[in-house]
Image: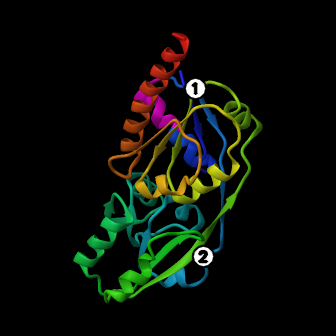
Amino acid sequence: MATLLLTRPLASSQRFAAQLRERLGDLPVVISPVLRIDPISPGPDLIDAQTLIFTSQNALGAVPAGQGRRCYVVGPATAVAARAKGFEVIAEERDAETLFQRILADAPQEPLLHLRGRHARGHLADRLTAAGIATRARVVYEQLETALSEDAKTLLAGDQAVIVPLFSPRSAKLFSAQHVGNAPLLIAALSEAVVAALGELPVFQVDHALSPDSGAMIDTIEGLIDAGRALEASHAGK
């Protein structure tokens, strides 16, 4: 069976590995993040903000308790983390674009504060402000590049298929830049933007999820596990 190589930040990789095993059973998994999350003090303006936006649960690790303040979030995991921290979730959407549309429909009168990482896509705060909804952005965590582990390098240098789920264009770029070895790569990409970020990475197969969420990624990985088995069978028959 192909081995899964998880490159998300450590806590996110551990959570996703647990989800994978719950859905698909015991799987060989190597965790080797290409990013590390480092919280940044959010600053005094967070104290005054009553309605927040979280597009990643990573931001919740850098903020104090919500104490009943309201928030918009992307994804079920972020919603769970926000409620656990004492925030009231107004709306949970599957991605930043649908969240943008939801906030436009709600047309909140109070200013919003988007708490995000240093590297972000979509310019959500700028777009909302341009649409008439006053929104500021505050960077509350860094996403720092880390090197692939020796276990990951050994895996990639082998001859067995490796399934690599990639959840962001930046992760895809970092993995592509660090990749070494000739193991057949089966890439599960969260979106077409992630596929585009792979650049010239030599891959045996790349599939992108039908929707940008963990459940769809696991569906994609399940298909790649079957592709890995077929690849192994073809090699065994030679």
The chief SS type of the magenta part is: helix
- Residue visible at 74% across and 41% down? 149
Disc ID at residue 28: 1
Q: Which element carries disc 2, helix, strand or loop?
A: loop
Instruction: Please say if 108 is above or below 176.
Output: below
Disc ID at residue 141: none
Q: Which element carries disc 1, helix, strand or loop?
A: loop
13 in magenta: no
Please say if the residues under marks 1 and 2 sit with CB atoms less than 8 Å apart.
Answer: no
Q: Is residue 81 left or right of residue 216?
A: right
Label 1: few (<14), some or many (≥20) within 10 Å?
few
Which residue carries the number 2 mark? 42
- Residue 45, given in percent of the width and then of the height, sits at 54, 84
Type of amino acid under label 1? Pro
Q: Earlier in the sequence, mark 1 or mark 2?
A: 1
Instruction: Please say if 140 is above or below 223.
Output: below
- Residue 225, given in percent of the width and then of the height, sits at 46, 27
Q: Nearer the viewer, mark 1 or mark 2?
A: 1
Label 2: few (<14), some or many (≥20) within 10 Å?
some
Q: Quadrant of the C terminus?
A: top right
